[in-house]
Image: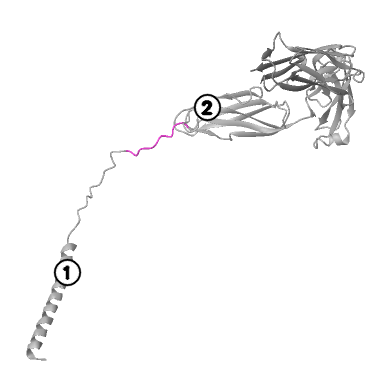
Amino acid sequence: MTKTSQKTMKATLFAIAALVLGVVVGTFWTQKEFNREVVPVDLTQVSTTDSKPVVAKIGPKVTIVNGERHDFGSMDRNAHGKHSYIVRNDGDAPLQMETGQVSCGVCIKVFAVAKPTLGPGERTDVHIEWDVKTSDVKFEQSGPLKTNDPNRPSVHLSITGSVIDNVRVDRPDVHFHDLSPTESATASVNIYAFRETDLQIEKHEFTNPKLAEHMDVSIAPLTESDLAREPKAKAGLKVNLGIKPGLPQGDFENTLNITTNQGSDPLTVKVIGNIASDIMLMGPNVMREKLLVTLGTFPQSAGKKHTIFLLVKGPERDNVKINIDAVEPTKEFSATLGEPIRDTAKTIRYPIVIEIPPGASPVTRGDGSYAKIHVKTTHPDLKDLDIRVRYVVKE
């Protein structure tokens, strides 16, 4: 290497070293200068000595201390119960209260607030009294307590429990439908005792003595299978109800009151039914009591075919002969009697097919202009029947 080259290299190295030294020194003095800087911060203290802390208002607040639902456990049917709900105002303003409409006006006898306005922290009672009037084994009734609590404007107060019977009848009524004036019939109800094994009927009587002349009552012990239908029953009796011949045609109703030795209120059983003619009109679109058949409205192109029945029962049923004597109108209207059908040992049905042929003239058959089917019978009391038919044929 020549002397000139050596001098050039030394100069270059010196320049680099000077540059590095300058950067280091510049950085040191810059950091030192900025470390002296202080960011201005407002440390002014906000005084709180002149203002009081704001506390949010609660307003009226209703609390039911002993619960909104009262379970009375078990009570005898028709017994009377009482309970008081304890109400407290947990707010900081007066609490206003009133009772609303109860779920059962017959069952709940009393529903009232002892003190309708409560100051903060005060208490009062809401009184409720009820009668266990239900045919079910569970009881639940309720009523609303209306308040000015913005969060609870209505508080639902309820009572619930189980109903226990001393004695109970298995059904409240028996029905006898379409009996013949000369026909007798029987039905029965079961009485169950749930507290004592010694069940006896001390008295029974009908409310309508005139109808009672045609009704019988007999009493017998329940069989083991009948008693087993009520697993909790300790004893039972069967009351047999009989209908004698001779009641007039039409509907009838009587009530049987039964008093037992169990000390409860009398049991009631309604006896409901009707005495009908030995020959009855029946079938679709039939008004039996009026001997009227309604076929509705139909186009003349379609025509109409409809089947009704005459039901014959009573002691003369096997001897009665029936035939269609005449029809009105004689044109575009017909009625054909079919072969008798024996449904049961006590009833026979006679089908009658009514027909208005397709293409019949437009006509309205109604009030004052019914079509009619004249029926003759050999029944000693019902020799003639006029069946009316109502319909409209449209173009």
Q: Is residue 303 left or right of residue 204?
A: left
Decide if residue 284 is in sight here: no
The residue that mark 2 highlights is 146
Q: Is residue 149 left or right of residue 353?
A: left
Other residues around mark 1 within 10 Å, as few (<14) / some (14–19) / many (≥20): few
Identity of the amino acid at label 2? Lys
Q: Relative to 328, does residue 56 appear above or below in the rendering?
A: below
The residue that mark 1 highlights is 27
Q: Relative to 20, does residue 388 appear above or below in the rendering?
A: above
Q: Position of residue 48 (x, y in %)?
A: 29, 42
Q: Farthest bottom residue?
A: 1
Q: Position of residue 358 (x, y in %)?
A: 70, 21
Are discs 1 and 2 less than 8 Å apart at CB? no
Identity of the amino acid at label 1? Thr
Q: Nearer the viewer, residue 371 or 260?
A: 371
Q: Nearer the viewer, residue 26 or 54?
A: 26
Q: Position of residue 127 (x, y in %)?
A: 60, 26
The image shows a total of numbered marks equal to 2
Q: Farthest top residue?
A: 368
- Give the colouring mode of the picture: one colour
Residue 57 lies in the magenta-colored region: yes
Question: Which stretch appears magenta?
Answer: 52-60
Q: Quadrant of the N terminus?
A: bottom left
* Tag nearer the camera, 1 or 2: 1
Displayed quadrant of residue 222: top right
**Residue shown at the point (75%, 20%) measured from the top left:** 355
Q: Is residue 107 left or right of residue 7?
A: right
Give the main secondary structure, helix, strand or loop, of the magenta stretch: loop
